[in-house]
């Protein structure tokens, strides 16, 4: 099944380890029909060495389309094998991770963001991925690594990967990564955002597609980023922190669909059917806590939210609650009917353009020097 069956990835939810699993993606798709969903990053080796247990890692409900498989790896043979094994599952796109700063990935694993220092390998990997699938291939990366953070170095990476492989779409997390021992969480806040680098890429590589990522927290910011020229916008933590208000407005504000009359109660009724159907699918997993986790911010900032979370914590410890249905029956009394039955509030559009300064700070245009040297370095 190809990505051309769906509206373009004007909005996507970032791949996040221990967040964008099957349960979260199920909840997200109940709220938004058009947002593009990403798996957690899956190492190529995991797919290859777990080929007798692939459903646990790769299976998803067809309702989740459009969906992107993100893989990581540093061995071309395993990357190729992993794509072949993933093909029967019908992902709409394959994304290669060149942005994860986790020491487990960028350090011991020697992949993730560290691969930005080796664009020739990334181009080779993308060629291998493309040769083994019929769907589009993309790269997710940062704007730099440690002291390799100049705009020209970023452009060299983009130029080499795009000119030596079929890659025509890059998702750019607009911060560099620091591999000096800070945590992945700190890597999402300590390096400063440089949106000017992103918009300079849009200017300097007109034949490529660029999706902006990093620090975007509202539907209004998604809208203004697109108005400033981003081909797509990817949101991460905000879509987990407040899934109802962020995802609930994407179809209308970004894709032009009519305002939704969907309520939280309607979503929960469908989600509990899903949840009860997957409990214990793989031995003891998933368990109730894993299935409920995407719901823990479902009532963000609403009356009853704090009490709901306290009841949820207590319910996790109650051995008598063995289904998602019984869990919700026990806890949802803390949420007023007015919250459960209210339709999605339409997001306001038209706040100040938070990306305007980026356009004023654009670095000088990139010119690839010594083209043959770049191509064969």
Image: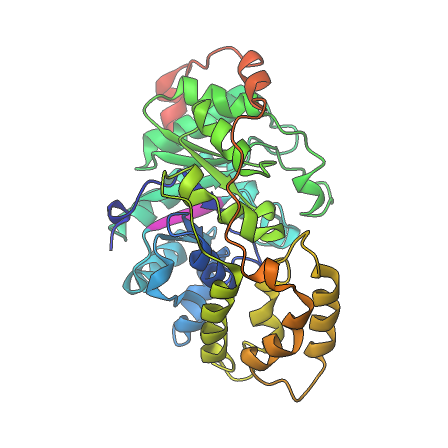
Q: Could you tell me which quadrant the C terminus lies in?
A: top left
Q: Position of residue 41 (x, y in %)?
A: 50, 55
Q: Is residue 223 left or right of residue 107?
A: left
Q: Is residue 91 left or right of residue 214?
A: left
Above or below, 283 against 302 in this view is below
Q: Is residue 60 magenta?
A: no
Above or below, 247 against 334 in this view is above
Residue lying furthest bottom? 320
The quadrant holding residue 82 is: bottom left
Instruction: Say which of 327 and 228 sits in front.
Output: 327
Magenta span: predominant SS is strand
Q: Is residue 344 left or right of residue 333?
A: left
Q: Is residue 377 visible to us here? A: no
Instruction: Say which of 78 and 313 sits in front.
Output: 313
Q: Could you tell me which quadrant the N terminus lies in?
A: bottom left
Total labels: the figure holds 0
The quadrant holding residue 319 is: bottom right
Instruction: Say which of 365 and 339 sits in front.
Output: 339
Q: Is residue 211 visible to us here? A: yes
The quadrant holding residue 144 is: top right
Q: Position of residue 267 (x, y in %)?
A: 48, 63
Residue drawn at point x = 44 percent, y = 24 percent: 227
Please give the range of residues in magenta.
93-97
Q: Position of residue 183 (x, y in %)?
A: 71, 47
Residue drawn at point x = 67 percent, y = 47 percent: 184
Q: Position of residue 156 (x, y in %)?
A: 46, 25
**What sort of colour scheme is used for the picture?**
rainbow
């Amino acid at each position: 099944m190809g990505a051309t069956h769906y509206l373009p990835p004007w909005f996507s939810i970032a791949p996040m380890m221990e967040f964008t699993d099957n349960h979260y993606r199920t909840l997200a798709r109940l709220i938004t029909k058009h947002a593009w969903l990403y798996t957690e990053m899956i190492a190529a080796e995991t797919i290859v060495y777990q080929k007798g247990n692939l459903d646990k890692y790769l299976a998803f409900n067809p309702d989740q389309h459009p969906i992107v498989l993100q893989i990581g790896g540093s061995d071309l043979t395993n990357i190729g094998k992993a794509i072949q094994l993933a093909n029967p599952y019908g992902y709409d796109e394959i994304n290669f991770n060149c942005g994860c700063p986790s020491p487990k990935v960028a350090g011991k694993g020697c992949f993730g963001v560290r691969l930005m220092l080796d664009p020739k390998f990334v181009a080779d990997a993308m060629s291998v991925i493309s040769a083994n699938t019929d769907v589009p291939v993309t790269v997710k990366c940062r704007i730099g690594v440690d002291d390799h953070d100049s705009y020209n170095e970023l452009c060299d990476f983009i130029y080499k990967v795009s000119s030596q492989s079929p890659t025509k779409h890059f998702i750019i997390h607009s911060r560099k990564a620091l591999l000096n021992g800070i945590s992945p969480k700190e890597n999402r806040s300590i390096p400063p955002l440089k949106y000017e680098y992103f918009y300079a890429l849009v200017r300097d590589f007109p034949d490529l597609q660029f999706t902006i990522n990093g620090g975007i927290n509202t539907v209004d910011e998604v809208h203004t980023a697109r108005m400033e020229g981003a081909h797509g916008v990817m949101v991460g933590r905000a879509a987990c922190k407040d899934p109802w208000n962020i995802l609930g407005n994407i179809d209308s504000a970004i894709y032009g669909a009519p305002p939704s009359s969907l309520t939280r109660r309607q979503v929960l009724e469908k989600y509990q059917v899903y949840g009860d159907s997957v409990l214990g699918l793989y031995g003891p997993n998933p368990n109730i806590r894993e299935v409920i986790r995407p719901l823990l911010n479902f009532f963000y900032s609403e009356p009853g939210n704090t009490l709901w979370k306290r009841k949820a914590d207590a319910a996790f410890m109650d051995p008598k609650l063995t289904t998602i249905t019984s869990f919700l029956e026990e806890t949802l009394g803390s949420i007023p009917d007015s919250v459960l039955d209210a339709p999605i509030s339409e997001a306001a559009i038209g706040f100040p353009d938070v990306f305007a300064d980026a356009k004023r700070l654009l670095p000088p245009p990139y010119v690839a020097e010594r083209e043959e040297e770049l191509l064969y370095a």
